[in-house]
Image (cartoon, rainbow, N blue to C red):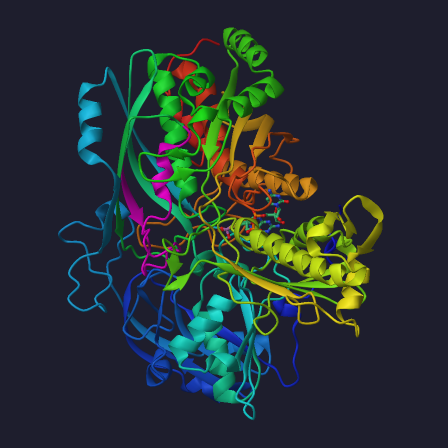
Amino acid sequence: MHRKEDARFLRGHGTYVDDVTLPGMLHGAVLRSPYAHAKIVSIDTSAAEAHPKVRAVITGETLAGLNLAWMPTLSGDVQAVLATDKVRFQGQEVAFVVAEDRYSARDALELIDVDYEALEPVVDARKALDEDAPVIRDDLEGRTDNHIFDWETGDAARTDEVFANAEVVTTQDMLYPRVHPAPLETCGSVADMDPITGKLTIWTTTQAPHAHRTLYALVAGLPEHKIRVISPDIGGGFGNKVGIYPGYVCSVVGSIVTGKPVKWIEDRSENLMSTSFARDYHMHGEIASTKDGKILAIRVKVLADHGAFNGTAQPTKYPAGFFGVFTGSYDIEAAHASVTGVYTNKAPGGVAYACSFRITEAVYLVERLVDVLAYDLDMDPAQLRMKNLLKPDQFPYQSKTGWEYDSGDYPRTLRMALDLAHYDELRMEQAKRRDAGELMGIGVAFFTEAVGAGPRKHMDILGLGMADGAELRVHPTGKAVLRLSVQSQGQGHETTFAQIVAEELGISPDDIDVVHGDTDQTPFGLGTYGSRSTPVSGAATAVVARKVRERAKIVASAMLEVSPDDLEWEKGRWFVKGDPAAGKSIQDIAMAAHSSLELPEGVEGQLDATCVYNPPNLTYPFGAYVCVVDVDAETGQVKVRDFVAVDDCGVRINPMIVEGQVHGGLADGVGMALMQVMAFDEDGNHLGGSFMDYLLPTSMECPSWRLGETVTPSPHHPIGAKGVGESATVGSPAAVVNAVLDALKPYGVRHADMPLTPAAVWSAAQGRPFRT
Ligand code: PCD
């Protein structure tokens, strides 16, 4: 089925936040810090206030008066909305100007005079805990260092024991560099405080409208029923739009102060420099095995750079997200990880950019370690994986770090990927090319993800449990409207969620309207990220449709004058067992439910139902990827020649959408592996503030993806579906990096960090003899 929403998107009729225009609307702009670390001595706003088109200038001091200068982050830290004492990263929000138009607002920023006293910045996370490192968060009482948290998982003693007795121990340091979700649409909001009703309406770029509303209520003390958050069409989220940014809060304050609606839309550089980054994990990994390649244990120490405020996104109990799945897809004896988080003078974040809370880092770690082990043992990396993959009869599988993988047949999926790629022939071709002095690499990666957060008893964000809802109304004529707590940013929910209802009730998906992204119109829920919409709200949707079906059964029994027990369901109708001609369609039943028909016990006069779904477990999609690259030995340029991706996300609701999701994620992976990094100089200047410096992959750098699929339904999901939105971003970077390093093997290169730019590849191979 084609995407219903494309009818408006392809014609340019989407409505994004920047398309919202209200009568009398004013425009806001943010003044940002040029320094990574500096004391604010004074701020003079008088010249800006005198600008004829300026209506208000808001500073940290203004906000402090309202008790809004600081706001909570997703991790229970606080973040400055507008800086009062110090600036702690380049691009930090310092003042907010509200003017009659966007240009005047920007012009007036230049009239604000801020006197800064530069301080030494902490740029390298590895130096953040040095004795003499400047303390970044002196706003926090009693703070004398830049340490945020220590967290560990697994069994340290048992892991040490297995390592001590292992025949082979392989060690590798690796960096998962700081990257950015970089959605095409930047962040923004239009805030409208109605001075008469006291109702605040915010159109905003959010992946979690309900959570935002509750937070505005709690933080600003506004009554929750007087706040309406509307997340209209969103031009990509990728985790960038989960949290609340200072600009959103400023637009709200701007509207309260001026009594007019205030629009704030970020530009590209602001988005790249100040909104949530992802990754930035320095990992020291170790893998123990037997001489013939049976993996026994994995041990890892991580130093996590969280920037100036701990704004990382994850359920409360998991300060390192779901990094605990770093044991990957393998049957091992013991595992242990420890993660230390530190502050640096960089933008806050640590969002799950196409990653269910640090799973991307975890998968990269284990898949690089397995390849490094293959290198050391001189084994084929595909065979080494095959030897160690979990077997189908081990599911549900209890991992050594406490995760219960729901279902899988890993060897079948890997075999399919290798077959599709013609793996054996590729290895033969590679041998020939190496003889001819050419660099060709074949990279294999296998991943398991944990998506669909989460069981409410284990998972919450800022105290809000991670269940999600769905409401289904069936109109008298049998058309339906489904209201969801999750919010699409391009994933196609208006199509797939209608398809779930259609499948359960036999109403055409075209007759089902999906409503989302408006807190006044939808049930409460925590929103869309971590590929949780299908696992959680998708389950709620199936359950709610089944409730409607059960109500319809009771109505049908009254219509047909038989007992409900004598009815049988076929898609779209209830009929009398043994008499298929005597039946009523769901449309007939909907009309009858609203008619004067005397209804039996169990229905009140309509079919509508609601559901809040509290998932019993996460879902565990998985996949096998094979990447083939050619590397130019002279320039270091990598060309991705072929890419095979076999994904298993359980039952696929819309195969075309799933393939689109995979295509997008694979492109993401090529970007991270080969060209993207948020770099900083030693003063903390951001070096990736535009798409000229922070490179996004285009079709030019991507091959024509070749996809395969296996289907292992999730046993606990009502329709057997697992999430898929982030799978390819999680699995592909390791495949690309493994391929490039496989190409460089003749030079004796065992590891090099992402991004493998031509310069990085070229220098990795320097000084090593290789026949040409
Ligand atoms: N599906 C189907 N089947 C299955 C699964 C799934 O069909 N089995 C489909 C659904 O329904 C949707 C999609 O597919 O439509 C997806 O899903 P999921 O997986 O559930 O997910 P979601 O929740 O919906 O979403 C989310 C994701 C994420 S998370 C991300 S990053 C990204 C992805 O999604 N983002 C985005 N993808 C995408 N796409 C687009 N277009 N855009 C965007 O933005 Mo995070 O955490 O936020 O970082």
In the displayed structure image, the side of residue 2 where residue 178 appears, left or right = left
Query: In the drawing, does residue 489 fall left or right of residue 277?
Result: right
Q: Position of residue 228 (x, y in %)?
A: 55, 76
* The residue positioned farthest toward the bottom in the image shown: 196
Q: Residue furthest front?
A: 562
The vertical placement of 589 against 582, above or below, is below
Residue 415 vertical placement versus 447 (above, below): above
As rendered, which of 614 and 76 lies closer to the eye? Answer: 614
Q: Is residue 20 visible?
A: yes
**Residue beneath the point at 72% across and 53% down:** 505
Residue 764 percent across, percent down from the top left: 39, 26
* Residue visible at 70% across and 69% down in the picture: 606
Residue nearer the viewer, 230 or 438? 230
Q: Quadrant of the N terminus?
A: top right
Residue at x 45%, y 49% (from the top left corner): 616
Residue range of the region highlighted in magenta in the rendering:
300-329
Q: Is residue 194 above or below residue 565?
A: below
- Tell me if 154 is positioned left or right of 609 in this view: left
The magenta stretch spans residue 488: no
Residue 51 place in picture, x, y as percent? 51, 86
**Is residue 313 part of the magenta span, yes or no?**
yes
Give the residue furthest to the left: 131
